[in-house]
Amino acid sequence: MKLSKTLMVTSALTVAAAGGVYAAGHGMADSMTLVSWGGAYQSSQQKAYVEPYLAMNEGVTATWDESSAEAVAKLRAMNEAGNITWDLVDVVAADAIRLCDEGLAMEIDADELLAAAPDGTSAEDDFGDLLVSDCFIPQIVYSTTFGYRTDMVPEGVDAPSQICDVFDLEKYPGKRALEKRSINNMEWALLCDGVAKDDVYDVLETDEGQDQALAKLDTIKDEVIWWSAGADTPQLLADGEIFMGSTYNGRLFSVIEEQDQPVAMMWDAQIFDLDGWIIPEGLPEDRLARVKDFVTFATDTQRLADQSKYISYGPARQSSAPLVGQHADLGIDMAPHMPTDPENAKNTFLYNYEFWADYRDDIEAKFQAWLAQ
Amino acid sequence: MTDAANDPDKITGPTPDNAIRASEAAEATDGAGKVLAADGTPLKRSLNRALRAQKMRALMLVAPLLLFVLITFIAPIADMLFRSVENQIVRETLPRTVAALQDYDASGDEMPGDAAFEAAYYDIFFAAERKLHTRLGSRLNYEMTGASSLFRKSGRGLDDIGEVYQDQFEDLDEAWDEARPWAEMMGDPDWIAAQEAWSEDDGAMPRFELRDGVADVLPKTAEAYRLFARFMQVEEGDSPLEEEPWTVVHTALYQDITGGDISGYSGPGADRLAALAELVAGPDFETVRFQDAFEEIDEDWADPEIWKTIKTYAPAYTSGYFLNAVDAQKTADGPALRDEDERIYGLLFKRTLFMSMMITISCILLGYPVAYLLSNLPSRTANLLMILVLLPFWTSLLVRTSAWKVMLQQQGVINDVLVWLGLVGDADRLVMINNQFGTIVAMTHILLPFMILPMYSVMSTIPPSYVRAAKSLGATNWTTFWRVYFPQSVPGIGAGSILVFILAIGYYITPEIVGGTTGTFISNRIAYHISSSLNWGLAAALGAILLAAVLILYWAYDRIVGIDNVKLGG
């Protein structure tokens, strides 16, 4: 008698609890695994939209996985194993294109999934050209550019201001840091080997052009430290190990403004790139519903503008640009530190996604062989 | 490390094994006189039963660990290594092309015939719809740089061929661009009825069936439409009754009309088809040659190279990855070395072996005196020293490696001290990191405990009385050490060396951080292929070679020094 009563009460409670959870979540899962890059960038995401979202949705939890650098490999492995453990993955546009081409990322309808701008502009128009792939939800515009030690500039010489100063070992002796991959380095090498900006990709398409770029890189190869993590160049600069090095502009901002190191930016021929979310293909319905709900919130106009309070990357929405304010801790205006600021963007180089989607495998294989020799 | 005294076959005395042998011997000499156990069963059977139970019990005891090792260690490794020969992707993605290239001579410089282009058109079109062509492109790019971009462009460009036909068909009759007339022409009436009656709550859609006889009159169209309809049903979850077919279906229809006799067709839309045949036969009908269309997409298709590559890598299993791993390449005339500027793996293997050797030698030189000291000091002091040896073990590997970065870099501690002492000019500080030197120093430090501990455990068992005896017989300190002490400590060196060498050869994280480009190991390359280039087959082949190298070295060590001489303790 007593036992059956207890049982009845327990089951009633269970049903009530289950019903409650269901009602609260509208069939949405109550946890998400977000994949990002770690460091300052991830914490800007955490502060700008993950924390507010969790505060609005009680009972929901978000877990970070700092695997964006290996996202393509891992998603492929998950797909083969038939067990997708990630809900939302932050990748650069080139990886998004690749994942989309292989059917590992879900195609989205921007207008349906993403919020419209406050003035009513549709998401598709608000993001504009930045929707470079059917699967890609852009968040930020960042640029890969150079920083240099101001105290290592030789006496009687102007501070470096041209991209080709990187290749000029006579005028600017010292070590350089370059990324351990072909993208960007090949373009800069060709630009400094006399190729006109508009012709770079036409030249790079040919075997001769690729050899030409590698030959140019050969002239500084002995003086180069190759980096693979975004934190390497800032570290090397702070230690005085290198004179100049390429990295993401937000990392340089943090070395210069937050850590107050004798480092300056060289914006010449900065290469714009995009970073954003993709939703993996094949999520179960409840998790997909949760992720869609989150992504709509996290990429609306205000949230993207908020993110630029914590890191100097430009928001991907046009409607967010006027809302960019001051740094959350330092209180300095962020606009002049954005790669898209007119003063910084006097000479920019447009990264060609389609070209790199097509030629990445080809050129990367050559570049890595060159590097290993 | 086998011990003769523990071998059940060599123990004398009343053991179960010996009893079985005794009973067998008795049977052999005297077939009738069986030895019986107390309960009357033959002794042999009774003993076997007892032994079997014992063995089962032993097996049950090790079963959890055995299963664990099998499932989590052996099986994944075997699966990964299997990828080094597996090559289904070409055959699965381009089945028609592979068949069309059956008789193609890949050793000559001939171009394949039109049939190959036609097959490639269908294959790549279907692959592009299923999003498989970029993967195949990446796969072939490992063998022929340029294949990746070629397949990507083709996946986009092949639509143009079908559009030429689609546009002309549509100009003649709108119905050629509508879903319903196509479905009625190609689909079984029963299926159409079932599909119409289907609603989302019914679960899976009724499987598309071709109409009886349509495949005889319009074979290519039927095949293309069937693939389209099934793709729509399974992948997209859309009804073929509402989706216009892919342009490849129009191309197929054009081919059926020109290639065969369609007058026998009497199904739905027969008059439309007849009108279409008339249009196609007309002088103004625009056609596309597959070969021309391919060459327009990319002139690489006009080069026999890509066709040779497809043909060479068509089999389901390939030695290509292994050849790649030794800087060779599969060609139509057999394996050949790659171009000079593409050979890197031989260099990396040699470098890995050389540096692991250097690390092992440095560990021996640094570790031996420490181990000697540890084993000869009073235990209180020895324990304290032991903690110092073990301390690095308790520190994260990354922290230790990063610490070496701080020590060795040009603005680092060592260089600063040298400059301060005036030994080195400020302008020419030593380069001690991002090269082989940095890797060897950091890894020697990290692997040193693996050398000291086995040495110590062997040395502590060497009785001090031997040394005293040698000295009392008049040996000098050096002779005593070299002739008496050292030979007894060799098993410790052996154990430490094997441990350090095998650990070093597969090390990844430290060379990655401090090795730059000249101080990296083959394992860094394997990691690159796993996570960046996604060439898992090559990574598996490199891993298999590395594994084989370790096993061969182990075997050689066993032959030369003898594995019985290796002692990890006592």
Image: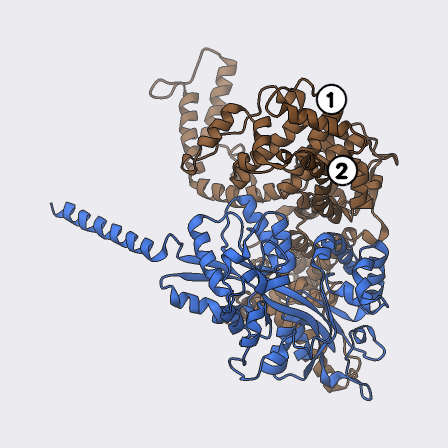
Chain in brown on the image: B
The image shows residue B152, relative to residue B43, as above or below, that is below
Of B563 and B410, nearer the camera is B410
| Residue B492 visible from this viewpoint | no
Of B9 and A16, nearer the camera is A16
Q: Give, as a three-letter code, the residue at label 2.
A: Ile
Can you tell which quarter of the image residue B127 is in?
Answer: top right
- Horizontally, residue B193 falls left or right of residue A220, namely left
Where is residue B35? Give x, y as percent.
42, 18
Say which residue appears at 50% left-offset and 56% top-offset.
Answer: A112
Can you tell which quarter of the image residue B49 is in?
Answer: top left
Q: Give, as a three-letter code, the residue at label 1.
A: Gly
Gap in angstroms between the C-alphas marked 1 and 2? 30 Å
Where is residue A313? Give x, y as percent.
60, 72
Near mark 1 (Cα within 10 A), the count class, few <14, some 14-19 or many ≥20, is few
Of B485 and B251, nearer the camera is B251
Where is residue A348? Give x, y as percent.
73, 71
Check disc 1 and report its element: helix, strand or loop. Answer: loop
Chain in blue on the image: A
The image shows residue B546, relative to residue B246, as above or below, that is below
Q: What residue does disc 1 label?
A: B260
Check disc 2 and report its element: helix, strand or loop. Answer: helix
Scheme of colours in the image: by chain
Q: What residue does disc 2 label?
A: B310
Where is residue A293? Give x, y as percent.
45, 59
Please state the chain letter of the residue tagged with numbered disc 2 in the rendered image: B
Asked if badges 1 and 2 are on one and the same chain, I answer yes
